[in-house]
Amino acid sequence: MNDLRKEFSNYDWLGIGLTLVLMAIGWLMIFASEYHAESYTHLLDLDKNYGKQLIWITAAIVLAVGVQIVDSKFIHTMSPLAFAAVLFLLFAVLFTPPVNGASSWFGIGSFRLQPSEFSKTATNLALAALLTRPQFRMQEFKYQLQAVGLILSPVILIALQPDAGSCLVYVAFFLVIFRAGFPPFIYILGLSMASLGIASLMVDDVSGLILSLIFLANLVALRLWQKDERWLLAAVALGAVLYFLYQAAYFWPLLLLFSASLISLSALAGLKKRGQWQAVGFNLGVLALSMGYSATVNYAIYKLLRPHQQERILVWLRPEKCDPLGALYNVEQSKFAIGSGGLWGKGFLEGERTKLDYVPEQSTDFIFCTMGEEWGFMGSFLLISLFTALLLRILYLAERQRSDFAKYYAYGVAFILFMHLFVNIGMTVGLVPVIGIPLPFISYGGSSLMSFGILLAILFKLDFERKSIFR
């Protein structure tokens, strides 16, 4: 008995407890979002999402317990096969009848199975296995391509469904390979491209954006080529003057003239030092590529995306251009529901906007609105604090692992949860586009709940065997 008790004490019960608490809170929120006194029968009413969610919670716990029977070495060995199986399912689901415009589910009676939810766990396992292969060297280009190719393989298939939300989650794996030594320059380039793409969508006059880029690029050039800080201060001062002239009709001509002057100054500075002309040419080349990239982003968004996909982006970046009763309505109602909760909320089952179904997808994508309205700021803060505690616990587990496989897997779990948490809550308050990502353990959904259950169950199993696991 003592040996059995000692054996079970090796489990991370704090992490397990936090997970179970989040599951319980999730069920309460789903119940609150669908409860109507006149139609309520019993908790296991399978016509309601709260009834189905109890089944999914039970299934997730059973699967999590089943994972504990499997040896960790077997999990490591079978990771590539699990990844291949998931890729096959992601390909096969493309031939199923579309639901809400997307072919993302296999129909099983009255239930639906979404392979993209389970693909995150399989990708995390396969990536951890790849990064810990004896011959793998992240510093070499061919191995960098292997890691990126593994991550993008499911992304391409998921994008064909199409399911942009699930694709976005795979950014988490780029954080994992960064932890493994992937070149930081790639991330700087990616962030720069993302920033430029977003900026180009936020202005009507793309040429004005490009002129602004010329201005900024030449500020950097002046700082590099002129050691005297007064050059930079003078340039910033002139930029501030132009900012206050923003509403004037002559703003863009003035900016063009000033940018051209900065280019001339850069060229003159290049005459003083050998080799600076190459830097000038590189600077202008980057600007030319920026112009082409900016035009490409605008074309892709406004010409290639479907109208409802365009609306999701415009609601985020250009809400003034959206119909208040159309795409903007969902986000506005979401923010109203959260704000109406105040500090302490209206009370459990007392949410008016929840009861009257003002917010769409109340029990799935926008479940956080129920928490905000019924439990207020304090309830929302508590929920986010529980998630934060779980994330910090997972990072702690990652650092204490003895095997690199378990360590990289644990980092993947933490980053996946963080992406879901940030994007889901962010879209309910208008910080990110509405792209349909569930809130882990809180949103209704069998595939989501079971996949997160397996994801964490494998982590707890790897941590349980950390003292005997292979290196």
Image (tube, rainbow, N blue to C red):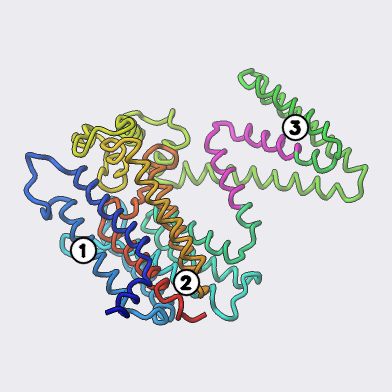
Say whether disc 3 or disc 2 marks the residue closer to the N-terminus.
Answer: 3
Could you tell me if the residues under marks 3 and 1 are in contact, i.e. CB atoms within 8 Å? no
Chain part drawn in magenta: 190-219
State the image coordinates of residue 218 (x, y, percent, origin top left): 76, 38
> Total number of numbered labels?
3
Which residue lies most toward the top here?
A: 248
Q: Is residue 94 visible?
A: no
Q: Nearer the viewer, mark 3 or mark 2?
A: 2
| Secondary element at tag 2 | helix
Above or below 219: residue 118:
below
Q: Which mark is residue 58?
A: 1
Q: Amino acid at mark 1?
A: Thr
Name the residue carrying label 2: 406
Depth check, mark 3 against mark 1: the one in front is 1
Q: Is residue 417 above or below residue 384?
A: below
Where disc 3 sits, the SS reads helix
Residue 51 falls in image quadrant: bottom left
Residue at numbered disc 3: 259
Residue 194 falls inside the magenta stretch: yes
Q: CA distance from mark 1 to mark 2?
A: 26 Å
Q: Is residue 8 visible?
A: yes
Label 2 crowd (10 A; few <14 / some 14-19 / many >=20) = many
Density class for disc 1 (Cα within 10 Å; few <14, some 14-19, many ≥20) is few
Query: Left or right: where does residue 295 sit relative to residue 264?
Result: left
269 inside magenta stretch: no
Looking at the rendered structure, which numbered label has been put on residue 438? none
